[in-house]
Image: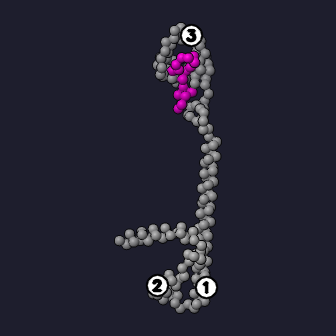
Amino acid sequence: MRLIVLCCSLWCLLAAVPAVAAEPPAASYVEIERRLTPEQRHATGLDTLSAEQLALLNRLLRESQGQAVEDARAQARAEAEIEAAAQRRQAAEADARPSRGPARFAGLAEGPIKARIAGEIAGWGPGDVFVLDNGQQWKILKGSLTLRTPLRDPEVLLVPGVAGRWFLQIDADLPKPRVYRID
């Protein structure tokens, strides 16, 4: 039960902090003699102070509270400025990244490869390997086709796709088989 009362008291105190910070110091200050019970005033010796001493104590406490409120406001402003700077930096980084076009997808930053297939080809199917005149070897992963007439040393274009996939283009009108490099 004491834990519940303590938690509720702490929650009320934390809920009051923004309200104290938002009010001007003079309006939120409660004089010390009003905060304490008669027993507490007697135990602390507050009831033995003169009116001038009590006024001085209240002024010092009010100024201290006012300074704490100003410090809290300054801290909140500094944190807001830091957050705004972080958001501006993130926005600038997002603007610097390519938002359109092939470079925003993995693998598309690389350009197509132009080469010739060494020898004659009559078609392709999964597992077939093509050796290019630049020495690269590419294996068909998906796709098959039989050509009507075999091609001798055809010029090909290896086109990058999304997520590191590559496609072999022999003719713009023919389907492009998916390939991967094996050398």
State if disc 1 and disc 3 touch (CB < 8 Å): no
Judge the density around disc 3: few (<14), some (14-19), many (≥20) Cα neighbours within 10 Å.
some
Disc 1, SS: helix
Q: Given this view, does label 3 or label 1 mark the residue nearer the observer?
A: 1
Identify the magenta region.
160-177
Q: Mark 2 points at which residue?
A: 37
Name the side, left or right, on which 52 lies relative to 4: right
Q: In this view, does 4 lie above or below 135?
A: below
Q: What residue type is labelled 3?
A: Leu
Q: What residue type is labelled 2?
A: Thr
Q: Tell me the residue at 42%/68% (across/down).
A: 7
Residue closest to the eye, 114 or 72? 72
Judge the density around disc 1: few (<14), some (14-19), many (≥20) Cα neighbours within 10 Å.
few
Could you tell me residue 42's position as x and y percent?
48, 89
> Residue 170, can we see it?
no
Q: Name the residue under label 3.
A: 151
Q: Distance between the residues labelled 2 and 3?
A: 103 Å
Judge the density around disc 2: few (<14), some (14-19), many (≥20) Cα neighbours within 10 Å.
few
Q: How far apart are marks 3 and 1 (CA)?
A: 103 Å
Q: Mark 1 points at which residue?
A: 56
Could you tell me residue 110's position as x and y percent?
60, 30
